[in-house]
Image: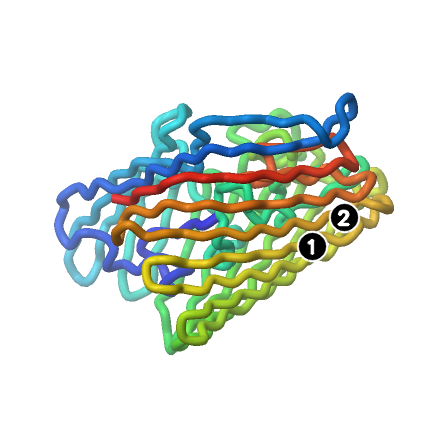
Amino acid sequence: MKKSLIALAVAGTFAAPAAFAATANVDVYGLVNYSLDIVEAGTATVGDDERDNVTGVDNGSRIGFKGSEDLGGGLKGLWQIETGVQGGALGNRNTFVGLNGGFGTVLLGNHDHPYKMASGHMDPFGDTIGDNAVMGSVTGGAANQASVFDRRMNTVAYVSPTMSGFSVAAAYVQPKQVETNVTDNDLTGTSYSANYANGPLRVIAAYEKHKGVVNGAAPALNSTATLDSDAWKIGASYKFGDLAVNALYEEIDRDGAANAASRDAWYLSAVYAMGPMALKAAYGKADDADSGANTGATLWAVGLDYNLSKRTAAYVMYADLDNESSATYGMGAGGTRYVPTAGLDASGFSIGMRHSF
């Protein structure tokens, strides 16, 4: 789940404006990240013994083109087109146009929400089988959802300049392109984050509200405009020399008798650098949702990265997901890659390599 709002705000949480070329030239960038995953994901028919051998799993590989243009008076025009390499339409990832100046940055396009990006740097296993998939979603009863608050949608977004380590971001989403009834214009989303970075310390707070329940089957807002859904989270990161530690707490609330599902969750992670190697570990726990008992889950992961160069690394990891009897949390990016039957577990071993350019 590591994302960045290009040209925006605090380092690590958002990339800095200097990441854009100072000319109108096009910069080409990307990531190639593939792994061999050997995963057990239980089903109702075979229990916990189903083994899913997957060769060449894509872990968020992408290619992008970006640039900027000096418009004079301290104003820059920004643009970016980013596409996943495993199918999908051109520009299906973070793709936008925008303006940057002393007032901050404004973007128009398809982009991750500030809520999603605020804590992306805290997950050392993003987009792999160890992805922190117990965060950002609620599982249980009629409110069973995957990645409810882990969205990329057409949006207008603003990020302030960084002042004494502080910056804020906000975004607005209106998913209905064509209204079919008078309530459609009530289907909106707003997302906010506040960020602080000072030396080894980083602190984030984020809030997102959906007016109309989010539909877990598609990255859009549901057609039920009378129900609301919101989430907030706080987190902190601190670096003790070669050891970086992260802590995150989240609460999600959903309205409506049939869809009520509120739950708390927390997540801890750490990375210890040893020369070219980095040891990684993470543990996350989602409590029961209000919609039903035994809807919580725990997920833990351990791994080792070996940096062959500044751009190329090999890695190995192991992850284990334990669902309570009525929970259906999954593993992988957004918890959607390996999803066991309700109440069953999943675990897996992954070995892979990534290269950024």
Judging depth in this view, the residue of 162 and 72 nearest the camera is 162
Q: Give coordinates of residue 257: x percent, y percent.
A: 85, 42
Q: Give coordinates of residue 294: x percent, y percent.
A: 84, 45
Judging depth in this view, the residue of 340 and 17 nearest the camera is 340
Q: Are marks 1 and 2 in contact (CB under 8 Å)?
A: yes
Residue shown at the point (73%, 32%) measured from the top left: 48
Q: Secondary structure at mark 2?
A: loop
Q: How is the image coloured?
A: rainbow
Residue shown at the point (59%, 45%) measured from the top left: 319
Q: Is residue 84 left or right of residue 141?
A: left
- Toward which corner of the image does residue 355 lie, by quadrant? top left
Residue shown at the point (23%, 59%) measured from the top left: 18
Q: CA distance from mark 1 to mark 2?
A: 7 Å
Q: Which residue is mark 2?
A: 296
- Mark 1 belongs to which amino acid? Lys
Judging depth in this view, the residue of 316 and 89 nearest the camera is 316
Q: Give coordinates of residue 32: x percent, y percent.
A: 33, 37
Say how many tags the image has: 2
Q: Which mark is residue 285?
A: 1
Above or below, comparing residue 222 to residue 319 in the picture? above
